[in-house]
Amino acid sequence: MVQLSTILFALTVAGSATAAPAHLSKRIAQVITASTPKWEAACDTAGGGQQCNAIAVTAFGTLLAAAGPCDQQDNADIMMDLSKKLNSPDMIKFAQIFAQQPRNTPNSVSVEYCQKAPRNEELNGLFQCQFQGADPVNFTNGLKAGDAGTIPFGQTAVLNPAGSCPAHTSGPIADGTQLVDQVSSPGVPSGSGSGNNAPPAPSPASPKAAAKVADPMSTTTTPTPSPAASNPPSSSGSKGFAAQNGQDAQALNEKFKTLTADSSCTDGENACVGGDFAQCVGGKFVTSPCSGSTCVALPLVNSRGTSITCDTQADADARIANALGTGGA
C-alpha cells in the first residue's frame, strides 16, 4: 500500500511538471519596408532625389533580427544627415521616429539597446520600443534585464514601463506594427546623459553623409548622387551609363525570378524573392512583403548603378523603359 501511494504521488508530481506552462518562443516580425515610406516621401518632396530610396532601403534592413544593436541608430544618423542638409522638419521627425521603431526578434525576447551616443544631437536619448510579445526580462544574446545592453544608453535603470520609448511612453507597441503609424511626434528624449558625449554632427558637405547602394550583381558599391547631379553628356551616340543601368536592372529582375527563400546568398545581399523585398541573413533570404506594390530593381538616374526597392510594376516599367529608350522591367 505504501509502495502504491509512493508511485501515485510520483506520477502526480510528474503530471504537474508536464502540465506546467512553458515560455512559448516565436518569431516576432514586421513589414520592414513599411517603416520608411513617410521619411522617403518627405525626402522626395524636399528634393533628395535618388538618395532618398537608397538610404530608406538600407535603413529598413537594420530592423531585421540579424542587425547589430547600433545598426538602426547608425542608419538613423544617415537619415538625419540628409534631413538636416535639406532642412526638412518632416524628414527630421520621421528619422527620429524611425530610430524608435521596434526590431524583429527571432525568439520573442526583447532586443538589446545600442550603447553609444548618436552623431546627431536630434537623436540623443532616443531608443527603440519593443513589441508587446517580447519578453521584458530576457533579451537577445542571453542578456537579462539589468545587464549591460538592456538599459538604454545614458540611463541607469531598466525602463518603466518595460518596452516603452520616448515616442510611446505607455509601453510596447502591438507586434508587427509600425510606430510611425501610431504617433505624430517623436516624443521627449529620455536620459539626459544620452547626448553628453556625442560628437558634433557633420557639416552638410561632409562625405560621411553620402549613402552607398550595393548592387547584388557586383561586389562594388556605387555612392548615391547629390540631388543636383545629372547624367553626363552622351558620347559617340550612346546614352552613357543610363542605358547600362537599365540593362543591369533588367538582368537583376530576371535573376530575381529564379530566386526562392531557399536560394543560397551572401550575408547582407538584397534581392527580390517572390515579389517581396529580401535580405540575406545567415546565408538565407529573410523576406518582407511590399505593401500594395512589388519588389523590383530600378536603374539609378544620376549615377552608375541600380537600387532594389518596392514599387508598382507600371512605374518600374516606365523607369527602365526611360533608361533604355525601349523595353521594361
Image (spheres, rainbow, N blue to C red):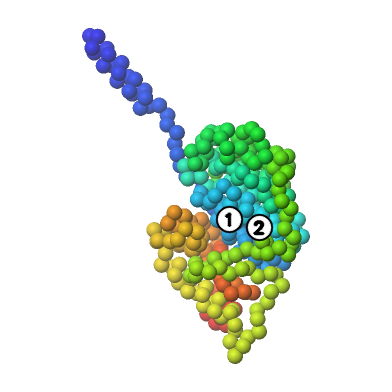
> Looking at the rendered structure, which numbered label has been put on residue 60?
1
Q: Residue at x 48, y 38 (%)?
A: 142
Work out which residue is located at the far bottom of the displayed protein and give it: 236
> Looking at the rendered structure, which numbered label has been put on residue 269?
none
Q: Where is residue 20 in the image (x, y as percent from the top left)?
A: 40, 26
Q: What crowding class fits label 2: few (fewer than 14 Cα within 10 Å), some (14-19), or many (20 or more)?
A: many
Examine the rendering and report whether any part of residue 185 can be seen.
Answer: yes
Between 161 and 220, the one lying in front of the other is 220
Examine the rendering and report whether any part of residue 314 can be seen.
Answer: no
Q: Which residue is drawn at 65% across and 79% down?
A: 231
Left or right of 13: which side holds 108? right
Q: What element carries label 1?
A: helix
Q: Residue at x 59, y 74 (%)?
A: 304
Q: Where is residue 4 in the image (x, y as percent from the top left)?
A: 24, 13
Give the mark count: 2
Left or right of 197: which side holds 278? left
> Disc 2 marks which amino acid?
Ile
> Disc 1 marks which amino acid?
Phe
User: From what the image shows, is residue 244 above or below residue 30?
Assistant: below
The part of the image, by quadrant, that contains residue 114 is top right
Give the foreground label among 1 and 2: 2
Please name the residue that numbered disc 2 is placed on.
78
Q: Position of residue 255 (x, y in %)?
A: 44, 70
Q: What crowding class fits label 1: few (fewer than 14 Cα within 10 Å), some (14-19), or many (20 or more)?
A: many
Between 3 and 236, the one lying in front of the other is 236
Mark with earlier residue (1, 2):
1
Q: Where is residue 72 in the image (x, y as percent from the top left)?
A: 60, 51
Report the Cα–Cα distance between label 1 and label 2. Answer: 12 Å
Q: What element carries label 2?
A: helix
Q: Residue at x 53, y 69 (%)?
A: 220
Asked whether disc 1 touches disc 2, contact meaning CB atoms under 8 Å apart, the reply is: no
- The image quadrant where one finds the N terminus is top left
